[in-house]
Image (cartoon, rainbow, N blue to C red):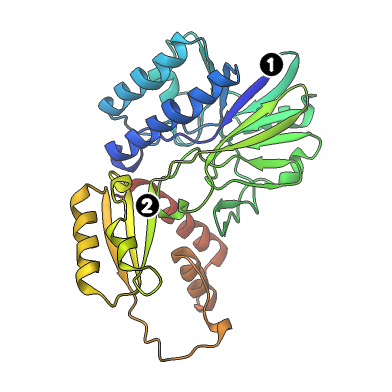
Amino acid sequence: MKIILLGDLHIGARNASMVLCDYQIKFFKSVLFPYMKRHKINTIFQTGDVFDTRKFTNHLILDIWQREVFDYMHENNISFHCLVGNHDSLYKNTLEVNSPSQHLSWYDNLYIYSHPSEVDFDGMKILALPWICDGNMSASLDLISNSDAKVVIGHLELAKFELFRGQLCDNGMDHTLFKKYDHVFSGHFHHKSDYDNILYLGCPYEFTWVDYNDPKGFHVFDTATMSNKFVKNPDRLFHKIEYDDRDKDENYWKSFDVEKYIDRYVSLVVINKTNSYQFDRLVSALDSIGCADFKIAESIVDNSVEFEEEELTDVNSIQLVEKYIDTYDFDGDKKKLKTLMQTLYVESLQTLE
């Protein structure tokens, strides 16, 4: 039996952005469903955070997802198993009230796991672990210790794994709690990474600029061979165009295809600009084509100034904040402050346009 392993979906993310919604739906209709049809796969296991916002759901977005995704799965006999993630739950200390149960439970091909459970797939027992909170902590730890399953699928927060590319989680459970299992597949973190028997699946698509050039897609798990295969999503939401009219001649920029950037987030990075007319023509084309967002990034660095190579480092915003915290003299818990800053940073990326 082959099972599609699917990471966080975040229905309604970025303040219920229609651009993001269309991009998400395209993944299902143009990438995932055709793949499943070609390979005769009819089971999906989704690892939590089906929905994005714990306190409300945009009904227009929900209607689109029901018609385009969930109705299709129902009509085509695709069984959809999903964990309740932290974004799905109304409360932080219990999963009893959650969005998948409220909005999707009437589909008879859909199975929602709000409690730690053992599930049988073609004779293989899988331990299903939704988001672990105060309300299910004891039951979760007991089942992790005593289950004889070989595979875990969870919405786990494990220490020392990457929240997103380049940023480690300082808190969370010790991954050695799961050392007896052959495979542990998890959602929650949006960056695909692995260590020992743990695989964070990553998300099937991009949400913010943090996801730029970070491979997205889904995995196929074979219960017979205990192997998994990553299938990349070829569609991208965020694009960088490097403008260099010394490297590329005028004919290249005249024939540059801007149509593919419709409803996409675009950053035009200026490397060398010697032909202002040509540059302005490109900017005008991109500005009028209908990008979801279009920004120009021009260098303000004086290239005549030479730097030692070790002085130039590639760090993101949260890393800069953490470096500042490390150098700041105060009596508080720096580790807790870093964790708070990480949480606020990730939440802001997921909610702000």
Q: Can see residue 95?
A: no
Q: Between disc 1 and disc 2, whose residue precedes?
A: 1
Quarter of the figure with residue 20: top left
Where residue 292 appears, as percent x and y from the top left, is: 27, 47
Tell me the number on the disc at residue 190: none
Task: Give the SS element for disc 2.
Answer: helix
In the image, farthest residue toward the bottom: 305
Specify whether 114 is left or right of 105. right
- Seen at 23% across and 68% down, the residue is 278
From the viewer's perspective, is residue 334 above or below residue 53?
below
Quarter of the figure with residue 335: bottom right
Say what amino acid the circle numbered 1 marks.
Answer: Phe
Where residue 186 appears, as percent x and y from the top left, is: 62, 37
Q: Nearer the viewer, residue 312 or 198?
A: 312
Q: Residues within 10 Å of mark 2 (few under 14, many from 20)?
A: few
Q: Residues within 10 Å of mark 1 (few under 14, many from 20)?
A: few
Task: Give the SS element for disc 1.
Answer: strand
> Could you tell me if the residues under marks 1 and 2 are in contact, i.e. CB atoms within 8 Å?
no
Q: Nearer the viewer, residue 185 or 53?
A: 185
Tell me the number on the disc at residue 348: 2
Specify whether 276 is left or right of 22. left
From the viewer's perspective, is residue 44 above or below residue 344?
above
From the viewer's perspective, is residue 93 above or below residue 192?
above
Quarter of the figure with residue 176: top right
Q: Nearer the viewer, mark 1 or mark 2?
A: 1
Q: Can see residue 62?
A: yes
Specify whether 68 is left or right of 205. left
Where residue 342 appears, as percent x and y from the top left, is: 48, 57
Q: Residue tagged by mark 1?
A: 121
Specify whether 202 is left or right of 178. left
